[in-house]
Image: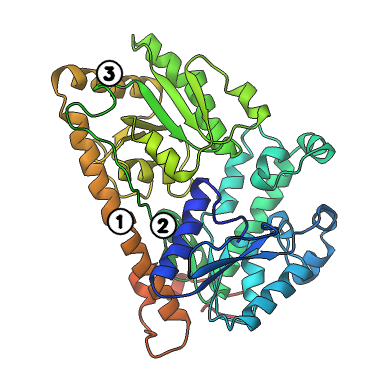
Amino acid sequence: MTRPLAGAGGRGAVLRTVVDSLVAAGHVVRCAVVGGPAVPDPVTGAASVHRLPDVALLDVLTGGHARRRGLRSWNERLYWSPAAAAAVRRLVAEHAVDLVVADGVRLAAHAEDSGAPWFVDLDDLLSERYDLWRTRRMDLHQLLGHRRPAGPAATVLRAVPVRRLLRAEARALRAREVDLARRAPGVSLVSPVEAARLAERSGTAVRALPMAVSTAVHRDWRPGGLPAPLDRRLVFPGSLTAFANEEAVRWWIEELEPALRAHGLRGWQLHVFGEVPAQAAARVRAPSVVLRGALPRERLHAELVRHALLLAPQREALGLTVKVVEAAALGLVPVTTPQGASGLGAEPGRDLLLFGGGDDLARVLADVERWAREDPAALPAIAARARAWAGSSFSPAVLTGRWARVVEDLVPGPTATATATARDAVPAVPAARRTPHPTRGGTR
């Protein structure tokens, strides 16, 4: 894993899903974290955390070991070293591991070299995200996210021009994603849309395995429940260490909220729950933005259900938007863009509310204000349908079954099924359209 299981955000939800699903299916899970906590705590009775050696900044910058291993991207250099690879192999041998699951393209080489059957959960198509970010104003410090260094190194990284780096990285990652889809015994993406795209490129079946969402609380929409019928506080849960989240908040400040005021809609605020680095705080400071800080998951949910609407102002389709699904499971009404709803299978106007820009959002929130006056049952009805939709596709029981089939397919044993892959996978393109594998002369 690239980060501890307790990590927040979308990738944290996916990692929790993998571990919780495998445990629920009856397996023992060893979470191996590159540069993880020195004294790891158990996650559950059947899951434990092990620390893998971190990769020194000098090794990342020189990259000699990674290049000799055949790894070409900086993303892989951040997490691969001979010491970490050896530690993975020791864990596999000591604990008689039956299957190694890699957290993204960054750790795929560790799984491939482990000596056990292996599977790569790519999360999203990182190559496409990098292609997109070449058009954005950002620095390398932002790009590194939770791997960003502190001190003098941080100052140096902020001065590095990233567009050329992103172009080369996107090209290397695109080739690596296709290669992994062909080489690995199994590969998945969170979004079915991206899974279909990778299946088309690689000529192999690619699974779509989203995050599971479960909550112990949900919003009380009954008369007298909290808060008041018209709540002009829009919630946005997301760490602003992630560039896409900061960009979403800045879109609210620069276009969306001014459009609301231009249409006569006053008093709407965006309440941001998540880590806010000092550099980002200056860029998102505005009268209509309330920074609520980062909270543990249970406390966050308890706060979110005191609101009625979640706003996910996402301008590009970047995998599945976890915050939209989680808001639906909590009983809030999700308000997002077509890109934010991409791949979710939700019905606009029925399960969530969609907008395309400032004027669209003003129309949506004008409807919300009208419903509060004339049709108080309208929002609770959407929230109820959203909860039902989230439960049908993203419940822990659904994902437990799907991850159990991953193990059945890849681990030899009496319960393995030779044809189970097709049940959760986007099929490969027809054989005539496949591209031969560059090293093996064919496709898997």
Circles 1 and 2, Cβ within 8 Å, touching? The answer is yes
* Residue occupying image coordinates x 58% and y 69%: 180
Q: For mark 3, does the 10 Å Cα neighbourhood hold few (<14), some (14 to 19), or many (20 or more) residues?
A: some
Give the residue type that dot 3 points to.
Ala
Circles 1 and 3, Cβ within 8 Å, touching? The answer is no
Q: CA distance from mark 3 to mark 2?
A: 33 Å
Q: CA distance from mark 1 to mark 2?
A: 9 Å
Q: Is residue 227 above or below residue 403?
A: above
* Residue occupying image coordinates x 67% and y 57%: 37
First in residue order: circle 3 vs circle 2: 2
Residue 258 position, x and y percent, is 45, 14
First in residue order: circle 1 vs circle 2: 2
Report the label total. Answer: 3
Which residue in the structure is indicated by mark 2? 210
Give the residue type that dot 2 points to.
Pro
Give the residue type that dot 1 points to.
Ser
Q: From the viewer's side, name the closer residue of 5 and 338.
A: 5
Which residue in the structure is indicated by mark 1? 393
Label 1 element class: helix
Q: Is residue 265 above or below residue 271?
A: above
Q: Is residue 149 above or below residue 284?
A: below
First in residue order: circle 1 vs circle 3: 3
Q: Is residue 38 above or below residue 319?
A: below
Q: For mark 2, does the 10 Å Cα neighbourhood hold few (<14), some (14 to 19), or many (20 or more) residues?
A: many
Q: Quadrant of residue 1?
A: bottom right
Which residue in the structure is indicated by mark 3? 366
Residue 344 position, x and y percent, is 34, 49
